[in-house]
Amino acid sequence: MRLSVKHVTRYSFDTPARWLVQTHKLIPSTCASQKVLSWKVNTGDAIRGAAFRDSAGDMVETISVRGPVDELVIEVTGEVETLDLFGVLRDHRESVPPTTYLRSTRMIRPDVALRDLSVTALDGMADDSALNRAHALARAVNEAIEYVPGETGEVTTAAEALAGGRGVCQDHAHALIAVAHAAEIPARYVAGYLHSGGDAMGEASHAWAELFVPGLGWVGFDASNRCCPDERYIRLCSGYDALDAAPIRGIMNAGVEEHLDVSVAVMSQHQQ
């Protein structure tokens, strides 16, 4: 499938910022399931700094802006050809060992309820395949947390989302990582795009989890949609949690209040 993306992030400031620095992970992953046909990240008058591929295989670029500045617009446009590999991440170069992703953070730390959910989901599956066990965890998260926008926020933890029983793709990804960790399965957060076509849960800017399955490697699981990522998905980057995998992170001088507006559109070639 050929997908086009237009992703605009607009920061406006109540008082002009004297300076700001950002780290971007806005270039799609290099892997067998997707081929970048064209891609451009426009940051206006920002000064581009270091650009490199990190140990997790993600492209990272830094920018800085010298003030005073009252608005920053980041526009991402591009086209990617995608292939359905049933969620398996192939030909993705990284040097981080999978066991690194057993590390916990505040967002994904499993509490008693998450550990119980993990145990219940895997009950009777001790002799089953690692892939089937991973699918069982994803189904359990989907059934335990109803997809309802507006019930959670950026800092909601996996434990809080499970306790509330409602959430969005970020919460599903966090909870799936947590229950995987409870079962001693390496898992990580993935940020990307989804061509929903009105049939899938989630916005165009989407998130899911990858679990490490012996014999296959990293396999993606979208608990929100009860599926593995297919040709509708574009993978951007990964991390321990949503904060670590954020496509845009930044700092600025103290005392400035920012307002954020984001618009994302993902279309298939036949829609254009």
Image (tube, grey):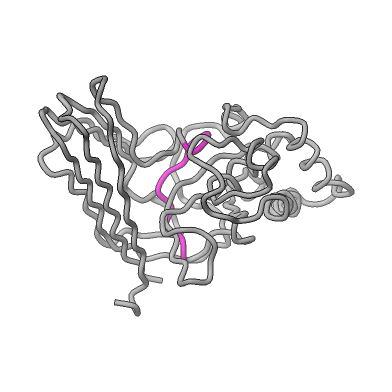
Q: Give percent across and percent down for residue 99.
A: 61, 31
Up-down relation of residue 142 to residue 95 (above or below): below
Which residue is rendered at x = 30% and y = 48% of the image?
A: 261
Residue furthest to the right in view is 124
The boundaries of the magenta stretch are 232-242
Q: Quadrant of residue 228?
A: bottom right
Which residue is rendered at x = 46% and y = 50% of the image?
A: 91
Q: Give percent across and percent down for residue 1.
A: 41, 71
* Quadrant in which the C terminus appears: bottom left
Residue furthest to the bottom in view is 270
Residue 130 placement, left or right of 241: right
Which residue is rendered at x = 69% and y = 32% of the image?
A: 110
Q: Give percent across and percent down for residue 256.
A: 24, 26
Q: Nearer the viewer, residue 113 or 5?
A: 113
Q: Could you tell me what secondary structure mostly forms the magenta stretch?
A: strand
Which residue is rendered at x = 74% and y = 51% of the image?
A: 140
